[in-house]
Amino acid sequence: MSAENMESKTTIPAPPPREPGYTGSLVAPAVPSDSFHWDPAGKKPRLAALIVILSVSFLLSLFLSSRPSDAGVGDANIQNIPYERGDWKCASEDFSDSGLMSQLGADSYTLRNYVNVRSRQQVQLYVIYRRYGRREFNHNPDQCFPAGGYRVLKRDTALLPYGGKERPVVHMLFDGSHVERTDGKEGVPDATVTYFFASGERTEHVFLKQQMWMAMERFNPNRNGWTLLRLNSPKTTTDADALAGQVDFMKAFGPAIQEVITTDKGNSEPAAL
């Protein structure tokens, strides 16, 4: 049989019989590419989520519009901290770097060296003030002193007077034997360092808690801002004498520092976290 005769005898299979009563097309309808993502029942959850988002946005805008006004509340000027109190006198002040305040992200700061004329103990007072607690306090002794070559010997808590109470503060002892001096040699006195954060009368020595306060106050500012206070004393006799010197310093200067950094005079101290 020739090829032509074979082609002429080729038959096409008949379509399957229709079901009884079926009048539609035998061709399957085209399926949309996204048909498997479409769920009519999903309209209600999406609508509910949209309503929740709009409600939260409305309540948040209403809350922010009712925040206390800035009227009558000014910035704290750290330079108003006294240079002399009792037996403590300021021997020097490092305020020469005009770009330091911008680098720190501070609204006001100071770095002063005080000496007790009787005990000869020394306290370097480092204060950074930030209105409403804007930005973070990354420049604290936990990072800066090790970066400068100091080795941590001890880290615990101590008590310093502030706001009429004994407040817990971070207490650190540093070994300065490997710190590079300006003459190229190594070795400076060991250091006793204490630091804490203050907002008006309130204080906090745990960095993460202070950051939580600062985050919440983006919505409801306390109008006192936040201040980092750091006291650094070189070891001249003993570590205990250095810490005792810092306690005596805060007894003399604590009330004045609190007065300077409290811009909202009617603010009361809230419950601790």
Image: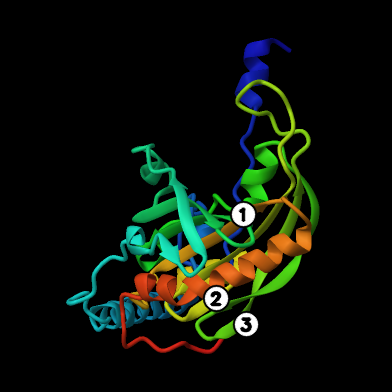
> Residue 108, position in %: x, y?
35, 55
**Which mark is in front, 2 or 3?**
2
The label on residue 251 is 2
Tally of numbered discs: 3
Disc 1: which residue: 232
In-image side of 87 versus 169 (left or right): left
Taking depth in this image into account, of 70 and 203 the one nearest to the observer is 203
Q: Residue at x 58, y 85 (%)?
A: 165
Identify residue for label 3: 166
| Mark before the other along the chain sequence, 3 or 1 | 3
Q: Element type at marker 2?
A: helix
Can residue 32 be seen by looking at this rendering? no
Upstream in the sequence, badge 1 or badge 2? 1
Q: Nearer the viewer, residue 243 or 106?
A: 243
Q: Is residue 212 above or below residue 135?
A: below
Near mark 2 (Cα within 10 A), the count class, few <14, some 14-19 or many ≥20, is some
In the current view of this chain or complex, which residue is farthest to the left?
Answer: 71
Residue most extreme to the right: 153
Residue 201: percent from the left, percent from the top? Answer: 46, 81
Q: Is residue 141 left or right of residue 105?
A: right
Q: Quadrant of residue 19?
A: bottom right
What is the C-alpha distance between the residues marked 3 and 1?
A: 19 Å
Q: CA distance from mark 1 to mark 2?
A: 16 Å
- Quadrant position of residue 207: bottom right
* Circle number at residue 8: none
Q: Quadrant of the N terminus?
A: top right
- Of badges 1 and 2, nearer the viewer stands 2
